[in-house]
Image (cartoon, rainbow, N blue to C red):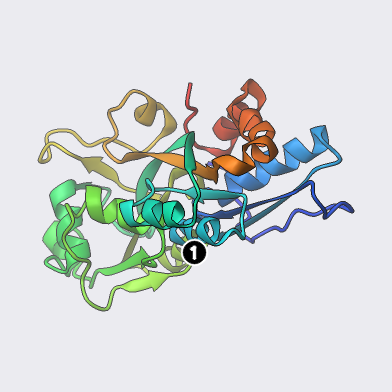
Amino acid sequence: MKKLVLTVIVLTSSLLGAQAQKIKGSDTMLPLSQKEAESYMKANPSVTVIVTGGGSGVGISALVEGTTDIAQSSRKIKFDEKQKLQEAGKTVKEVIAAYDALAVVVNPANKVSKLTREQLEGIFTGKITNWKELGGEDLKIIPYSRETSSGTYEFFKEHVLKNKNYVNGIMSMPATGAIIQSVSQTKGAIGYVGLAYVNKDVKAIHVSNDGGKTYIEPSVANAKNSTYPIVRPLYYYYVSSSESKVKPYINYILSKEGQKIVSDIGFITVK
C-alpha cells in the first residue's frame, strides 16, 4: 500500500466565490476527497473545492450549521443529526462514495499476526492487557483509538466491540495519521485505521469473525469478496437545496474516472 501524506490540504484557486465548494468531516475520507477534488478542479478550472477533516461528527455538524456543502462521513448519519437538519428546514441526501476495510494494526516487531473479533473486543475494552495472553511477548498492550467525534471510532465500537465501552483512559488520537505514527513507534501498541492508510511502518492483523476457524487479511480483494469481516460504506451527505451546486462533483466521484481514484487510493469502489 502506498504511503499517504496525511497533512490536511486546503485546495484553493483564484476563484473563491460562488463556485467554491466545501467538503468537511471524516479523517478516513480525507485522502480520497483531496485526490478527487484535485482531479475534479483540473477538469473544471472555474470551480474551487476546499477539503478539511475533523471527524465525521464535525462534518455533519457543519452541514447542520450551513458551513459546509458536503459532509464526508465514515458512518451513517444519526437519528438526532437528521432531526437537527429537519428542525433547520433542511432535507439531507446520502451518497455512498466508496467502501473501506477497517484494518487493525500493530507494531511490525509484534509477533502476533492474527486475532479473533472476541480478542479485539477484549483488548479494546480492557479485559486483555498483555500480549502474552494472545501468544505474544510478555508486554503490556497499549490500545489506540480515534476520538469520539470520529465515525471510525463509532463503527469500531458498534461492529467490533458490539457496543461495549472502550477501556477507560484509552489513548485517543485526533487523526488516523497519529495512530499510524504511535503504533509504528510503540512495540506494544495496537490501533485501527482505514485500509488506505496502512503502510510499511505498521503490520495489519488478520482477523477472524468465526471464533478462530479462519483468519482473513484486510485487503481490497478480501473486502470485495466479503470474506474480510470489517467493511463499511463511506458517505457523502448534502442538503437538497444545494444539489445543483454539489451534484456535478458527486457525479464525478461516481464516474469511471472518480471510482478509479477510489481504487488507486486503496478504497473499494461502489460498482
| Residue in the image at 63% along x and 28% along y | 251
Residue 129 figure quarter: bottom left
Question: Which percent across, then down, holds residue 57?
Answer: 44, 60
Q: Which residue does the numbered mark 1 point to in the structure image?
A: 175
Q: Could one spot residue 105 in this view of the protein?
A: yes
Tell me where residue 226 appears, x and y as whole percent.
30, 27
Q: Is residue 229 left or right of residue 243?
A: left
Where 149 falls versus 105 (above or below)? below
Q: Is residue 216 above or below residue 257?
A: below
Residue 167 relative to residue 218: left or right: left
Question: For this rendering, which residue is in front, 208 or 226?
Answer: 226
Residue drawn at (78%, 40%), measured in percent from left and top? 41
Outermost residue, right direction? 14
Q: Is residue 233 above or below residue 68?
A: above
Hey, what amino acid is under mark 1?
Answer: Ala
Q: Which residue is drawn at 15% across and 54% down?
A: 119
Q: Where does the image place residue 205, in percent across and percent down from the top left?
A: 31, 47
Name which residue lies at 26% across and 37% down.
Answer: 229
Label 1 crowding class (10 Å Cα cut-off): few <14, some 14-19, many 20+?
Answer: many
Name the side, left or right, on which 108 lies relative to 20. left
The percent coordinates of residue 114 (x first, y second) are 24, 46
Residue 199 visible, this orientation: no
- Callout 1: SS: loop
- For this rendering, which residue is in front, 77 or 161? 77
